[in-house]
Image (cartoon, rainbow, N blue to C red):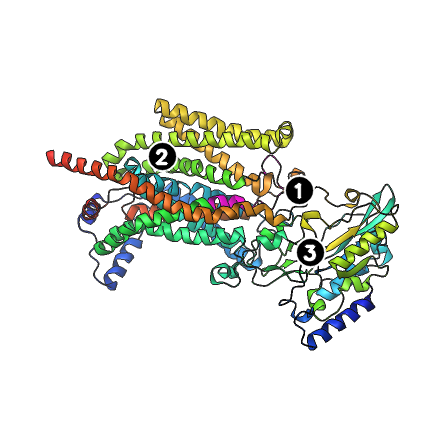
């Protein structure tokens, strides 16, 4: 989907809301309306198209009030010598990989999982999965950093250097989305490496590209099934482990790893007190008898 | 150490301080707050500067945040000494309270009654100070009341359960300990009411402990791709719960052996006599529980297909933990109990405690991102160590203050004992 279609669709959505239809995707009120299953939004990243211009990084920094990176050619040359991960002041980073099929640039940021580990970990719902796909962070966070431990992609970053720290990460430009504007990185991308749309449509587009160019791409869309599916989907010309992806994460959504324990909670809460009270009653008589015996003994002395 | 004037104890034992109104209470409290005995003991001389330095560092941490130089935490190692040792290990060591409450109040194991008050007090203070240390570790500490007041309840989060359980369990332990406070202040009617709450608090407390001791393990469940397969299993919560039993009891043995030296004059003869029996009994329980823990560990090693990792460097580290600090002390507990040799049992308890520290720290940073070279791993910063030490020392000071004033180790006042027998 290009920008024009997106804006048209946004317009239709706004018109639909104005028309009073309850079922339309009113984006500004996204909290109330969930389009269900796959109708969350996401970004398709076609790594074969990226030229490593880092304009997405600059646009991201501008949109989120982060330090603006130098993206001149000479600066880029130096930057691509090192592997980078996102930081508390860089929500999106591009890395260069030398593979069997040549050089590829890969942009990485929050994957916006369908069922995010960070959201399941949060005890105050500061991390939230918004109904239309965005994983966002809020100020009621207490800073326990369990989201960082629970994220399979190590995305949430903590501002250790600040007295009033925040958790920082890409939020899929949630504010811009509510105003009907494309994510900054997508808007800035000159090569259509990044494609924004509902997860269903970008997944279809990814499949179409693979089907039409079976020799160009590997037969895998990273993020389709990984950790239960993510809103960022990646296409690649080479196996994903060659361009810095973890391919051993499995397809189980991360929150499911702690459900086993959580199921045990009501069970123990109901059973334990009853069992213990029973044990107490069952052993009490003996204790009382012993007590009486002691009394008698004391009396004798 | 502080020495008490026996005449004063005898007088207070008999009558109590006779508090009738708030004014009485204040003057009583003022009197009690004053230090007693010799202040210039070696322990005080060493501990006081460390504590004060720690408090300064705490203020510094609150002012500048968690980054360097306060801690060595990083994006790759978000949890370090304060969570791994102070909170997670500290809570495991405090497990003795719920185990002994179960034995004494639920099963009626009267044999262990003499040590129950000291153990519950230790448990309560451990939660207050060590779990309380979480305030320092959480980055946005001024929001700490959010999970309690409902600035969004993350009810499906393991951390939510752990936070609430810490809070409720502290209350339960305070209720369990409250009769001692009532005896100290000589409030007879209050003592009677509080005494009736004990069983309820104990049952509630054990239920909470079962869930949050295992819950601390469940926190690591979503670190699946970061914890070495020798340690990561879907049964981490079960392992945490079982190990908290022998961790707690080893702490009881260790703390008891020190208390008996330091507070010796306060302990009555009957208790002194039964003490050996108690320690031998605790050693037996430790041995049995450790055996079942080892059995589960062996089953999981096979179940998780982790056996091949044993011949890697991380495998050796795993074997040091499991063989050196679980299997060997387990064996020593058996031997010590057979021969009624308290020094073997004490040594076993210390080894067990080291093993628990290793185990909990493995989950938080040693076996966490085990592939990171040692030079880039997390190691505690000096300020983290000093603050941790100052928290432990403050807890010991609080423990000593209470033991020297309330009937924790010494027998309860006669009126209170009479109350319990009726």
Element assignment for label 1: helix
Q: Which residue is mark 2?
A: B257
Count of picture labels: 3
Q: Which residue is mark 1?
A: B376
In this view of the protein, which residue sits in the foreground, A86 or A19?
A19
Bin the neighbour count of mark 3 within 10 Å (Cα to Cα): few under 14, some 14-19, many 20 and up.
Answer: many
Spot the residue most to the left.
A300
Element assignment for label 3: loop
Residue B67: give x, y in percent of width and height. 60, 53
Is residue B215 found inside the magenta-colored segment of the image?
A: yes
Answer above or below: position of B80 versus B320. below
Bin the neighbour count of mark 2 within 10 Å (Cα to Cα): few under 14, some 14-19, many 20 and up.
Answer: some
Answer above or below: position of B181 versus B239. below
C-alpha span from label 1 to label 2: 40 Å
Whether callout 1 and callout 2 share a subunit is answered: yes
Circle 1 chain: B
Element assignment for label 2: helix
Answer above or below: position of B328 versus A202. above
Q: Residue at x 77, y 61 (%)?
A: A196
Residue B75: give x, y in percent of width and height. 65, 50
Circle 3 chain: A
* Quarter of the image where the N terminus of chain B is located: top left
C-alpha span from label 1 to label 3: 29 Å
N-term mark: 1 or 2: 2
What is the span of residues highlighted in magenta in the rendered image? B212-233
- Does residue A54 appear to the left or right of A164 in the view shown? right
Answer above or below: position of B24 versus A234. below
Q: Which residue is mark 3?
A: A112
In this rendering, which labeled residue sits more in front, label 1 or label 3?
3
- Does residue A201 appear to the left or right of A165 in the view shown? right
In this view of the protein, which residue sits in the foreground, A41 or B79?
A41
- Does residue B299 appear to the left or right of A279 in the view shown? right
């Amino acid at each position: 989907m290009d920008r024009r279609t997106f804006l048209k669709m946004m317009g239709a959505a706004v018109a639909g809301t104005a028309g009073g239809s309850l079922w339309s995707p009113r984006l500004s009120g996204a909290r109330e309306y969930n389009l269900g299953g796959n109708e969350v939004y996401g970004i398709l990243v076609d790594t074969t198209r990226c030229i490593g211009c880092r304009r997405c990084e600059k646009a991201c920094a501008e949109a989120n009030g982060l330090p603006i990176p130098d993206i001149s050619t000479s600066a880029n040359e130096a930057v691509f010598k090192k592997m980078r991960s996102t930081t508390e002041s860089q929500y999106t980073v591009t890395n260069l990989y030398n593979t069997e099929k040549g050089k590829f640039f890969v942009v990485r940021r929050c994957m916006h999982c369908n069922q995010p580990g960070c959201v399941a970990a949060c005890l105050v719902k500061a991390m939230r999965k918004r109904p239309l796909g965005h994983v966002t962070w809020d100020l009621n966070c207490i800073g326990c950093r369990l989201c960082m431990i629970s994220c399979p992609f190590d995305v949430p970053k903590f501002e250790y250097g600040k007295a009033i720290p925040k958790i920082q990460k890409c939020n899929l430009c949630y504010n811009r989305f509510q105003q009907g504007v494309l994510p900054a990185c997508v808007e800035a991308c000159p090569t259509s490496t990044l494609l924004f749309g509902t997860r269903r449509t970008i997944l279809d587009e990814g499949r179409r590209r693979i089907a039409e160019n079976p020799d160009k791409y590997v037969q895998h869309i990273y993020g389709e099934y990984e950790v239960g599916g993510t809103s960022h989907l990646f296409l690649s010309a080479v196996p994903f482990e060659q361009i810095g992806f973890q391919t051993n994460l499995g397809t189980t959504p991360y929150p499911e790893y702690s459900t086993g324990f959580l199921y045990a909670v009501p069970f123990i809460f109901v059973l334990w007190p009853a069992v213990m009270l029973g044990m107490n009653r069952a052993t009490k008589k003996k204790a009382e008898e012993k007590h009486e015996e002691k009394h008698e003994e004391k009396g004798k002395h | 150490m502080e020495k008490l004037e026996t005449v004063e104890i005898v007088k207070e034992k008999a009558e109590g301080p006779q508090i009738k109104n708030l004014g009485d209470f204040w003057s009583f409290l003022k009197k009690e707050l004053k230090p007693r005995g010799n202040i210039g003991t070696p322990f005080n001389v060493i501990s006081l500067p460390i504590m004060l330095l720690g408090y300064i560092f705490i203020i510094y941490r609150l002012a500048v945040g968690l980054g360097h130089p306060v801690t060595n935490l990083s994006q790759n190692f978000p949890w370090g000494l304060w969570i791994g040792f102070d909170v997670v290990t500290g809570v495991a060591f405090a497990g003795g309270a719920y185990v002994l409450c179960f034995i004494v109040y639920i099963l009626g194991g009267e044999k262990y009654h003499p040590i129950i008050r000291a153990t519950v007090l230790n448990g309560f203070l451990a939660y207050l100070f060590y779990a309380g240390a979480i305030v320092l570790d959480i980055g946005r500490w001024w929001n700490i009341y959010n999970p309690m007041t409902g600035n969004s309840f993350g009810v499906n989060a393991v951390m939510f359960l752990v936070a609430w359980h810490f809070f409720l369990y502290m209350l339960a332990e305070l209720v369990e300990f409250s009769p001692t406070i009532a005896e100290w202040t000589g409030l007879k009617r209050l003592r009677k009411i509080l005494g009736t709450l004990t069983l309820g608090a104990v049952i509630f407390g054990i239920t909470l402990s079962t869930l949050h001791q295992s819950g601390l393990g469940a926190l690591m469940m979503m670190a699946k791709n970061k914890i070495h397969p020798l340690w990561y299993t879907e049964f981490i919560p079960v392992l945490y719960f079982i190990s908290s039993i022998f961790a707690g009891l080893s702490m009881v043995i260790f703390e008891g052996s020190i208390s008996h030296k330091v507070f010796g004059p306060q302990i009555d003869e009957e208790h002194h006599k039964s003490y050996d029996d108690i320690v031998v009994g605790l050693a037996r329980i430790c041995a049995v529980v450790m055996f079942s823990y080892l059995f589960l560990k062996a089953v999981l090693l096979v179940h998780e297909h982790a056996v091949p990792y044993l011949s890697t460097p991380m495998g050796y580290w795993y074997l040091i933990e499991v063989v050196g600090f679980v299997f060997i002390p387990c064996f020593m507990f058996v031997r010590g109990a057979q021969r009624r040799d308290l020094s073997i049992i004490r040594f076993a308890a210390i080894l067990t405690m080291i093993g628990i520290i290793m185990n909990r720290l493995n989950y938080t940073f040693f076996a966490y991102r085990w592939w990171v070279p040692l030079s880039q791993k997390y190691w505690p910063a000096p300020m983290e160590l000093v603050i941790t030490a100052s928290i432990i020392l403050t807890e010991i000071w609080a423990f000593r203050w209470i033991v020297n004033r309330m009937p924790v180790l010494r027998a309860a006042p006669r009126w209170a004992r009479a109350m319990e027998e009726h």
